[in-house]
Amino acid sequence: MNVKVIDFNDKRKEFEAFHKSGGAGMNYAGFECLNGVFQFSLDGVTDITGLPHSGKSEFALELLFYQSEVFGLRHLIYAPDMRSYNEIRRKLIVKYYRRSFRGYDNSVNELDLINCSSWIDTYFLIATKADAKKPLTPVDLWNFTTEYEDSSGIVNTCFIDSWKNLFHDYTGREDLYLDYVLSYRNELAEHYKRHFMTIIHPKSMDFDKDTKKRRIPDANDLKGGSSWFSNGKVIITVDYPDKEKQTADIYFTKVKPDTLGRIKVIFDTLEFDYKKSRYRETIEGQICYAGDGKKKRENNEFIGFASEFNPAPF
């Protein structure tokens, strides 16, 4: 029988560290507007949705990039939605230098491509099918993430972009399949201390009768929606209400456990800088890329701004 009772003596050090961290043990997510709303945990799962061209993938990569820059986390990237290996690597290089890839003054040059290779290859492992003719399932990727280790160590996260690009081996009801496979994912994340992040496209969205715009999707608008919501831990919707401003609204529709953050909508705060391929926020007139706001707050460079962060609700 595959059941055992957990012995506290086996978990004592882990629990003491959990207590010392305020019941959290999670990483700052990079932006002050997210502080107190979302932290990055190494035993968690994050599901991200949004309308087409809403910035889902860029927001996910922003979160992952900061975790590498500051905390040294390594990521397995399976992203057919980003088209090709070259396109994924281009995005990572632009984020690394915060400069355009080509076509502008001070664009990335050939020497830059070489100089950043070691860092990118260490922290971002771009995955593909070993055999293009054979199917690849989400369970294959999650299991691979828990088993992979090289000279630089283990892989901490698995990022899938997107769910539709994988083979889903089931017959019958989709909701029962999702209940099984997502609960397996959650258990794997907790046991192996890995983070699994997934982009899921919504079903075809109808129009709001009042605004005449497409309704902003949430977990219930995903294919097999109720299963995504019931099995999800952190569920995020990214939306660009005004394409001219390039400022995103970030909807945290589910955040579990409560030590991780809380349900909230971050309106009109995170702006995407296309030339640098990075998000930024403006605090008291100061432009802050990932990590900048935290440094300025800790150095008392803001006058009236206070972060919302609380270590734990208990």
Image: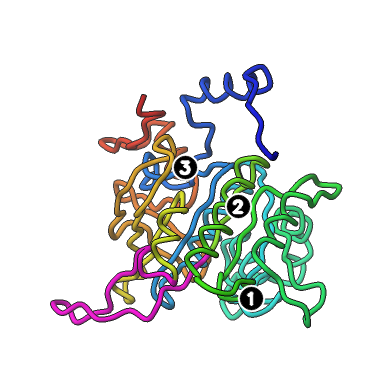
In the rendered structure, find residue 184 and report the number of the disc placed on it: 2
Numbered tag placed on residue 80 in the rendering: 1
3 vs 2, front mark: 2
The disc, 3 or 1, on the residue closer to the chain's N-terminal end is 3
**Residue 120 spot, x, y in % from top left:** 72, 58
Q: Where is residue 254 in the image (x, y as percent from the top left)?
A: 37, 51
- What's under tag 2, amino acid-wise? Tyr
> Mark 1 to mark 2: distance in Å?
23 Å
Q: Examine the structure image and report whether residue 294 is included in the region drawn in magenta.
A: no
Q: Quadrant of the N terminus?
A: top right
Query: Residue 171 lies in what quarter of the image?
Result: bottom right
Q: Mark 1 vs mark 2: which is more N-terminal?
A: 1
Q: What element carries label 3?
A: loop
Mark 3 belongs to which amino acid?
Gln
* Residue 85: quarter of image: bottom right
Q: Residues within 10 Å of mark 2 (few under 14, many from 20)?
A: some
Q: Depth check: give the residue in front, 76 or 15.
A: 15
Q: Is residue 129 above or below residue 204?
A: above
SS at mark 2?
Answer: helix
Label 1 Cα neighbours within 10 Å, binned few <14 / some 14-19 / many ≥20: some
Residue pointed to by mark 3: 39
Q: Which residue is drawn at 81% across and 77% down?
A: 131
Residue drawn at 42 percent across, 56 percent down: 235
Q: Which residue lies furthest to the left in this view?
A: 210
Q: Position of residue 196 (x, y in %)?
A: 59, 54
Q: Compare residues 215 and 9 and report the one nearer the observer.
A: 9
Q: Which comes sooner in the sequence, label 3 or label 2?
A: 3
